[in-house]
Amino acid sequence: MSVAAVASSPFELTDDQRAIRDAALAFAHDQLEPHAVEWDQDKHFPVETLRAAGELGIGGVYVDEAHGGSGLSRFDSALIFEALASGDPSIAAYISIHNMCAGMIDRFGTDAQRARWLPQLCTMERLASYCLTEPGAGSDAAALQTRAVRDGDDYLLTGVKQFISGGGSSDVYVVMARTGEPGHKGISTFVVEAGSDGLSFGANEKKMGWNAQPTRQVVFDGVRVPTDQRLGEEGIGFRIAMAGLDGGRLSVGACSLGGAQAALDKSLAYVRERSAFGSKLSEFEALQFKLADMATELEAARLLLWRAAWALDTQDPAATKLCAMAKRLATDVGFTVANEALQIHGGYGYLAEYGLEKIVRDLRVHQILEGTNEIMRLIISRGLLAA
């Protein structure tokens, strides 16, 4: 993919951005959508398909071109992840997490660290996982207990991370661990490679959705990590983690929009084809109004997401607040639209082969991860009251 500038207007895409979106849509249509239900049912993690995405430049969307990435903006990435999610929200969401990790290494790593990890992450020859959440520290991320104790030129990492997408299958783990005092100031960030002594994984979790990507505990039992695998200075790990989450929230919001748009598109096709009481379903005013509301809410959420992406690209001081707003609205609207689409399909919506119940299941978790939507409201309110 070629570099594309931020759109000249928040309401109009550039030719480059249309091309980027269309390439991602084609990949979703050809490589993801035909297999999405099967992957979900078989709990299959399609590594070869991920590498095919990497060949298109989707493994390092906003990593600098000098380090093997595509050098695109957060606005561009929102277009890409929405498009990918129209084929399979679960795989699109994993790709967004992988990109978040690569972006953190690009932004906060040294030249040596970028050269060591980014080329293979950008091609998705190697996969990455983000390790912040713990069994006892979810929304209160600053309370994490995983510790990194200095031992000469190394650190010894001990603790457990919970709900880690790609756990056990990824090659690189970006890990937040406590190196100092309680609270957010005592946290540092490390890159831990698969195969390290003392690194192990829990069972693949049985989940409501996101079945095409593995989710496991990641366990550190005295894992020795050299100091040259620490990102940034000691004590700034929480800031690194939160910087990654601003973009991550945009990405998961975009994935919700993509899944919901696919559900709406299925509904439009269904009401045009299906008849009841001697008329096409598309002729019933109640369904016309429902479809109109679904489309309107999706468009409103999309515009807010674009606004937030624009703010992140331009380093607007309100970016964190806007990213929280966009994530909250897009994930709530996305789930509601998908659920309404299932209802429109009646009993057929409940059948796995139509793909709607999978979209509903996949999108439900988006209201929880990357900070629950209750935490988004807390971030928003703090931003408002501090003004």
Image (tube, helix red, strand yellow):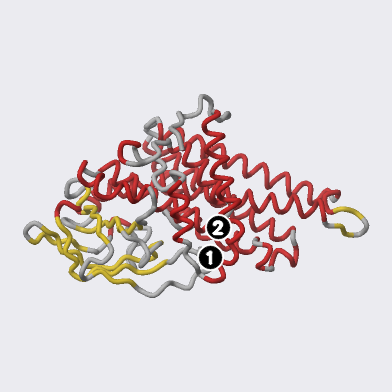
Asked if the residue at tag 1 contacts the one at tag 2, i.e. Cβ–Cβ closer than 8 Å, the answer is yes
**In the foreground, 323 or 64:** 64
Q: Is residue 97 left or right of residue 257?
A: left
Specify few, some or many for label 1: CA neighbours under 10 Å numbering under 14, 14-19, or 20 or more: many
Q: Of marks 2 and 1, which one's residue comes earlier in the chain?
A: 1
Label 2 SS: helix
- Indicate left or right for 387 with 302 as reference: left
Amino acid carrying mark 1 in the image: Gly
Q: Position of residue 105 (x, y in %)?
A: 29, 46
* Left/right of residue 288 with respect to residue 116 in the rendered view: right
Q: Which mark is residue 209?
A: 1
* Left or right of residue 14: residue 175: left
> Residue farthest to the left?
152
Q: Where does label 2 land, which residue? A: 363
Which quadrant does the C terminus fall into?
A: top left
Distance from disc 2 to disc 1, alpha carbons, whole Å, reads: 8 Å
Closer-to-camera residue (246/230): 230
Which residue corresponds to the image point at 44% horizontal and 52% vertical from the top-left? 95
> What's the amino acid at mark 2?
Leu
The residue located at (53%, 38%) in the rendering is 304
Bin the neighbour count of mark 2 within 10 Å (Cα to Cα): few under 14, some 14-19, many 20 and up: many
Q: Position of residue 338 (x, y in %)?
A: 64, 55
Residue at the image point whose x is 70% and y is 63% from the top: 349
Q: Residue furthest top?
A: 8
